[in-house]
Each structure stands twice: as C-alpha cells, then as structure tokens.
Image: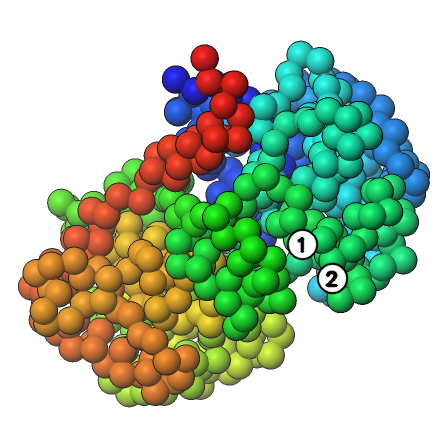
Amino acid sequence: MNTVRVLQVCAEIFPLLKTGGLADVAGALPAALAAEGARVRVLLPGFPAILAGLEGSTELARLAPPGAMAAAGPRLLFGHLPACGVDAYVIDAPAFYARDGGPYADAHQQPYPDNHLRFALLGWAAAQLAGGLDAGWVPDVVHGHDWHAGLAPAYLRAEAERRGQALAPSLFTVHNLAYQGIFEAAHFAELDLPAHFFAMHGVEFHGRLNFMKAGLYYADRISTVSPSYAREIQHHDQGCGLDGLLRSRAHELEGILNGVDAAVWNPAVDPLLPAPFSADDPAGKAKCKSALQRELGLTRAAGTPLFCVVSRLTEQKGLHLILEALPRLVEQGAQFALLGSGDPALEAAFRAAAEANPAAVAVRIGYDEPFAHRLIAASDVIMVPSHYEPCGLTQLYGLAYGALPLVRRVGGLADTVADARLETLDGDATGFVFEPFTAEALEATIRRALALYRRRGDWKLVRQRGMRQNFGWDVAASRYMALYGILAPHSAP
Ligand code: ADP
Ligand code: GLC
C-alpha cells in the first residue's frame, strides 16, 4: 500500500468554512485518500472558523515570510480538525485572516486589497513545510487547490533553485478556471520570488500577476475535476486566457471526477431529513416533499412535480434561463423552489417571481446547509443549466436523493448525467440533458421531464437507477493515489 505523505493546500474545508464545492472536496478527500493508505495533512489559512475547529493545537513555528507578509506576524499552528477528521497546519495571522466578511471578499463582495499577500503566505508556508519546517513530517507531495494555493508550486520551485535541490513535487487541481487571482504587476516585488519568474513562462499574465497561472505553470502535474472540463479548458472559449498553457501541458493534465461524501449526503441516514428514504424504500421521499411544501407555503400536492435549484447565484450557473422558463414551468402545473445567494439582480428577480406566484414558486435567499438537504430530498428535479461547470456537486446530490438532474451538457454535468430518451429508459438514463444555452432549449427539456413524470413507472425506474449510481470518493482517491505514485515513486514502500 502506498503510504505517501500528502500536504493538501486549500483555502476552505467542509464543514468549517465553505463558499462552494471546493470545500466539499477539500473536506472529503483526506479521508478518502487515507483509506487508500495515504497520510494526509492539510494546510489552511487561519480564518476564525478554522481556528475555532482546531483542537490540541501547538505552535510549530513563528514564520518569517518575506516583505509585507511578515507584518502580519504569522505563526504556524499544528493540531487536529475533528469535524474534518484530519490533522492540520493552520497559519495564525489575525491581521490577514480575522476579518468581517467572507474568506476572499468583504461584506460588500469587494475582494480584500491585500489578497495577494494573504494567499501568497499560504503558498509560501507550503514550501516551508516541504523544505522541512516540521522535521517530524515532511510531505512527499504538495497538492494545491485553486488560485489560493497557486503560489505553492512557484515557491517550491524558487526554494529548489535557491537550494540547488528539488523539494516535494506538486499537483495542482483546478476547480474553477474563471477565478484566477489576478493582481497588479507592482505586487510581484512583495512576493520575493526570483525576478525571472515574472515572465510569460512564469507568473506573468498580460502584464499582471496571476496566481492560477503560477499553479498551472510550476506544478509538476495538473488535474481538474472532470474529464470533460479537462478537455474544455484547452480551448479558447473555456480556457479563460490560459488555454494555450494548458494545451502545452496536455500530457500532464487529467480530469478526475469529484465524488459524493456519503457521510454527509445519504438519504437513508441523513439526520437533516424529516424522513429517511433509499432506492429500495423510497416512501420517505413523499414525506420530505410534503413537509417542504408546508415549510415554503407551496400548495400541498403530492402529485405536483417540484423542481429545485441550490446554487451560488452567479453568471456561471445559467440561472437567467430558469427565470425565462419559469412562467411556462408553472403554467404546466409544476412547482419551483430555489435556495441561493449571490448576484443582487438575480436575487431580486427570483424574489419577484416568488412574490408573483407564492403557491407555486418559493425562493429562499441565503446560505443554509440543512435546508439544502431538505430541498434536494423533497424535489423531483434539480436544475443545473450552467454556462460552464468544472464538475458540479448538486447534480450528484440530486441523483443520490432521487431528484432527477436536469442539466446542460457541459463539463462535469455532461460526465455524470445520462439523458432520458425513449431508447435510453431501459438503458442508462438518469436525468435530462440539453445543449444550446437558450431558454427555449431549457423549456423543451422541462417539457420532456414533465412528460416522463406523468409516466410513473418509467419515472420511478429512472429515479431508482440514479439513486443507485455510485459516485463514491474511492474512485477519485485511487486516481489521485496513482498520480502521487508517479510524482513521488520513492514514497511507496
Ligand atoms: P460551485 O462550487 O460552483 O458553487 P458545486 O455544485 O460544486 O458548485 O458545489 C456547490 C456546493 O455548495 C454544494 O454543496 C451545494 O449544496 C452548496 N450550496 C450552494 N449554494 C448554497 C446555499 N445557498 N445554501 C447551502 N448550500 C449551498
Ligand atoms: C468549483 C466548480 C464546481 C466544482 C467545485 C468542486 O467551485 O464551480 O463545478 O464541483 O469547484 O470541485
């Protein structure tokens, strides 16, 4: 068994701090890798929620990062995160991380002006650990996630150049190429990276500094969260300006599909649901639906199909298509419920739709983990009409909870949902898939979903097949283990 030591570097982790699917992945991956034999530790910024979850912590070192990062007086703590079941290094630097607002932006959604320093420190600390800062535990592989950890591979390379000796190899995983961590060139000097790193073959991007590019350029291997997205980001329309670099590294890039953490998302044992249910015993799902209709003030009717959305309200998710299609959905006798927050214009538009028709449309603006479970359990269909989607987790939760996913054929959605057509009903159908990014295409697919809903036997067949799909983390974990094995062959006994 491969007992590789892996340092996972990320900015959020479920259940302590979450803004999206990245946290779900960061929270589930350590245990899945440990089950394969890996010894995993995570490195996180000391956001208040992370520090509050850290038990038995000791100060490992007072950090002496370069330049302006030192002013934050960072200390490296080591302890255990019981909620995540993993040992963690946490950078305690209140001046950087203890702020009102979110981890990346203030309460008005404005990115913090010193984000380049806040997350450079994360990458710098990863390189220090690889360099032996904790003599009792030196990672064999550094595995960074998204732009927040993008400088880890760059600092690893810089440190190796300085010492004339390679440190741990790195894997960099892209969860969303659209968020890159781009900063003015003047900030490069504050990072204390070698001057030649500020180049096209390096961290420079159209005259500015790009953390995502740093990860993509300096990591030894790159992965992303679905096979389709791995292909899509090598093309101009989804490459966000980095497709050329990704094409040049195509042979070192692979797509590994995310999984579902069955300890969190399993309707048979989910304590957040009013009634449990499963593929073999789906009766409890009707109770979940009726309880939710009551909770939201929707007409209580068991036979009325309920469509839902659980989402960040951003352009990525294609929700304006749903706003356009909503009147037709309701005209055809269906109900719609949304949980989400984000773009104020989208929030207002969905609120207005609910006010116009409260018996059939319900909207809850905000972030509410338990309600997300209740809503998905209650729904017949979960809609994810994304413009792009690196993997997407809510469609997987929908499959597990008997809410048939209605998705656009893009990224991880295309890799996880099989369209229900007459000829696939007895085959692999698990949901509804459409392609053109238009309200007409969405409406047509809603009509197909409603037609199937009326054919109760076929509906139950497709639903049961979806619920029986196995999107466990074990598959992804063994793929990551294979990559670690390539990167650090000596670590396997
Ligand atoms: P993304 O990471 O792009 O937001 P994913 O589908 O990968 O998309 O992950 C989204 C995660 O965030 C899921 O766990 C989903 O349930 C959760 N989520 C999104 N919006 C909300 C919300 N308003 N309340 C609770 N959970 C939410
Ligand atoms: C990103 C993507 C989403 C993916 C998640 C976890 O937030 O938008 O598609 O599921 O990361 O990898």
**Is 97 situated above or below 141?**
below
Question: Left or right: 461 with respect to 399?
Answer: left
Q: Does residue 21 show up? A: no
Q: Quadrant of the N terminus?
A: top left
Q: Choose top left, top right, bottom left or bottom right for residue 419.
A: bottom left
Q: Nearer the viewer, residue 36 or 197?
A: 197
Question: Left or right: 258 with respect to 484?
Answer: left
Residue at the spot 39% in from the left edge and 54% down from the top edge: 227
Q: Choose top left, top right, bottom left or bottom right for residue 66.
A: top right
Q: CA distance from mark 2 to mark 1?
A: 8 Å
**Is 378 situated above or below 189?**
below
Residue type of the residue flagged with mark 1: Lys
Q: Nearer the viewer, residue 422 or 356?
A: 422
Kindly state the secondary structure of the residue where label 1 is placed: helix
Q: Position of residue 131 (x, y in %)?
A: 73, 23
**Is 470 situated above or below 210?**
above
Q: Does residue 85 show up? A: yes
Dot 1: few (<14), some (14–19), or many (≥20) neighbours within 10 Å? many
Q: Are marks 2 and 1 in contact (CB under 8 Å)?
A: yes
Residue at the spot 33% in from the left edge and 57% down from the top edge: 415
Residue at the spot 50% in from the left edge and 67% down from the top edge: 235
Q: Nearer the viewer, residue 262 or 152?
A: 152
Q: Position of residue 485 (x, y in %)?
A: 46, 27
Residue at the spot 64% in from the left edge and 27% down from the top edge: 168
Count of marks overlaid on the render: 2
The tag on residue 213 is: 1
Q: Choose top left, top right, bottom left or bottom right for residue 210.
A: bottom right
Which residue bears the numbered disc 2? 205
Q: Position of residue 88 (x, y in %)?
A: 63, 27
Kindly state the secondary structure of the residue where label 2 is placed: strand
Residue type of the residue flagged with mark 2: Phe
